[in-house]
Image (cartoon, rainbow, N blue to C red):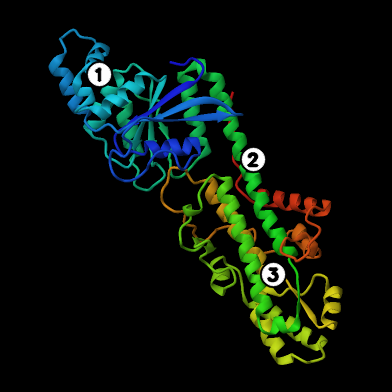
């Protein structure tokens, strides 16, 4: 048994979420196999948790216990009246039954004996039954510290209080609630703190791990905010200079919409990768990924209404812009232009760079850009996705679904100053053809300000005391 690397055996009844727990702790959605069928894990599998490239913990996923009462019956029938428990366990593991009838249980007990500590995973939605007490009795013969971990405690059907009371009657008070589906940084840190209190010689590596997890949460929050801020900067600065005919036949508007959709999709994929999730971890509902595209169209009244954004003002602005453009074009497209403006709605901006736009119109060209309602919608969706991913456990198999956000920060009031500045700089956007200001100091400063604004409005992970 290694003295340098903490060995942790994850044990428990079949189908209690042991593999899901390891996926969440290791941030690896591909570790092991997860499904509702019992006895999915047939062999011991391992993974390591690294801090600064150095392994600080080895986690072992073990098969589920299914017949602990049978093992106790076997031991009761064969042990003498004075036989110690450890000797009885040794006799069991050396017997043929440990590799035939009790093959899974044998693998679990051998791994627990070879580890420094065990995490006994409990599905807290299940009633407290005698078979679980038998499992704890058998596991106790391995003479290793055992920490009960109550899984699935975030749902409404949890029996956490019942389990804590039952475990306390068995003398197990170091109980941790940790949901492998709904991630909570504080729960993970409490788990490591409990291990640190039980295993003093591993105090330093566990402290390093706790500090690393707290730093990681803060870094992820900022990185996610920067990805969303970069999307908003690209959208706010995006400007397409197009012929009048392209506005009238709708092709320019379609092009602008497609650019914004693709850019939002890139941001979503980047957020998923940042939090180490797969593209398929999104549900095909409200904000889903369907065949590589968002399921809820960004440019529909339904999308704006779903996020509590008004569409009437945008349509009025669009109509006004259409009329102004037609007058500047010497009335050649008055009727069609007015209709086009009303249809464009929130997509047609009318304030930034007015002199430049007037010059373009006099040359028979128009400028199209996303309007404020579109920017607000992008912000709401991006922030909601980042927040949901930060609270999603890597052990869940259910695709992520997002409800109507309760965030009011982006529904009303003026847009943040960095976005208002971006409206004056088309060259700040990747979506503007020929843009040359993506690496400018001014854009970088604006991006930093906007990232800070997004973080100020978000829930900030709290770093606990780790020493």
> Label 2 neighbourhood size at 10 Å, few (<14), some (14-19), many (20+)?
few
| Residue count near mark 3 (Cα–Cα under 10 Å), binned few <14, some 14–19, many ≥20 | many
Horizontal and vertical percent position of residue 296: 52, 67
In the depicted view, which residue is nearer to us: 152 or 170? 152
Residue 307: image location, x then y, percent: 56, 65
* Residue at x 23% of width, y 16% of height: 94
The CA span between labels 2 and 1 is: 47 Å
Residue 411 seen by the camera: no
Left or right of 375 in this view: 24: left
**Mark 1 or mark 3, which is nearer to you?**
1
Q: Residues within 10 Å of mark 1 (few under 14, many from 20)?
A: some
Q: Quadrant of residue 198?
A: top left
Location of mark 3 (residue): 370
Under circle 3, the secondary element is loop
- Between 143 and 31, the one lying in front of the other is 31
List the residue tagged with mark 2: 219
Nearest-to-viewer mark from 2 and 1: 1
Residue 123, percent from left and from top: 33, 39
Residue 119 versus residue 28: which sits nearer the camera? 28
Q: Quadrant of the C terminus?
A: top right
The residue tagged 1 is 93
* Element at label 2: helix
Q: Verify CB contact (< 8 Å) between mark 1 and mark 3.
A: no
> Position of 309 compared to 403: left or right?
right
- Residue furthest left in the image: 77
Q: Earlier in the sequence, mark 2 or mark 1?
A: 1
């Amino acid at each position: 048994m290694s003295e340098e690397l903490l060995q942790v055996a994850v044990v428990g009844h079949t189908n209690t979420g042991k593999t899901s727990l390891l996926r969440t702790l290791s941030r690896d959605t591909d570790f092991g196999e997860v499904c509702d069928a019992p006895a999915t894990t047939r062999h011991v599998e391992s993974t390591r948790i690294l801090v600064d490239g150095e392994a600080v913990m080895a986690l072992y996923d073990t098969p589920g216990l299914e017949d602990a009462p049978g093992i106790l019956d076997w031991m009761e029938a064969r042990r003498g009246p004075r036989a110690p428990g450890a000797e009885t366990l040794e006799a069991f593991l050396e017997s043929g039954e440990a590799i035939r009838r009790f093959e899974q249980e044998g693998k679990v007990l051998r791994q627990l004996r070879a580890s420094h500590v065990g995490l006994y995973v409990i599905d807290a939605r299940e009633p407290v039954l005698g078979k679980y007490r038998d499992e704890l009795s058998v596991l106790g013969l391995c003479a290793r510290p055992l920490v009960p971990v109550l899984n699935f405690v975030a749902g409404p059907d949890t029996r956490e209080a019942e389990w804590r009371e039952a475990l306390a009657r068995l003398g197990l008070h170091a109980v941790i609630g940790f949901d492998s589906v709904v991630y909570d940084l504080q729960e993970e840190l409490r788990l490591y703190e409990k291990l640190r209190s039980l295993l003093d010689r591993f105090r330093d590596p566990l402290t390093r791990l706790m500090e690393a997890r707290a730093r990681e949460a803060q870094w992820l929050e900022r990185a996610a905010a920067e990805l969303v801020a970069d999307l908003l900067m690209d959208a706010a600065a995006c400007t397409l200079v197009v012929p009048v005919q392209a506005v009238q036949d709708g092709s320019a508007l379609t092009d602008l919409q497609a650019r914004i959709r693709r850019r939002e999709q890139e941001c979503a994929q980047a957020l998923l990768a940042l939090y180490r999730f797969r593209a398929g971890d999104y549900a095909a509902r409200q904000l889903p990924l369907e065949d590589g595209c968002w399921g809820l169209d960004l440019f529909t009244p339904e999308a704006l209404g779903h996020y509590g954004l008004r569409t009437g003002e945008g349509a009025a602005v669009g109509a006004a812009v259409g009329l102004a453009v037609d007058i500047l074009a010497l009335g050649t497209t008055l009727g069609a232009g007015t209709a086009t403006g009303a249809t464009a709605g929130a997509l047609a901006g009318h304030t930034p760079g007015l002199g430049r736009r007037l010059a373009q119109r006099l040359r028979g060209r128009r400028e199209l850009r996303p309007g404020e309602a579109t920017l607000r919608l992008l912000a709401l969706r991006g922030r909601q996705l980042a927040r949901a991913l930060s609270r999603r456990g890597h052990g869940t198999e259910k695709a992520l679904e997002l409800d109507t956000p309760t965030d009011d920060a982006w529904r009303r009031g003026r847009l943040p100053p960095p976005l208002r500045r971006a409206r004056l700089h088309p060259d700040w956007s990747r979506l503007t053809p020929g843009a040359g200001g993506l690496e400018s100091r001014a854009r970088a400063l604006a991006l930093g300000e906007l990232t800070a604004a997004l973080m100020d409005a978000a829930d900030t992970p709290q770093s606990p005391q780790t020493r």
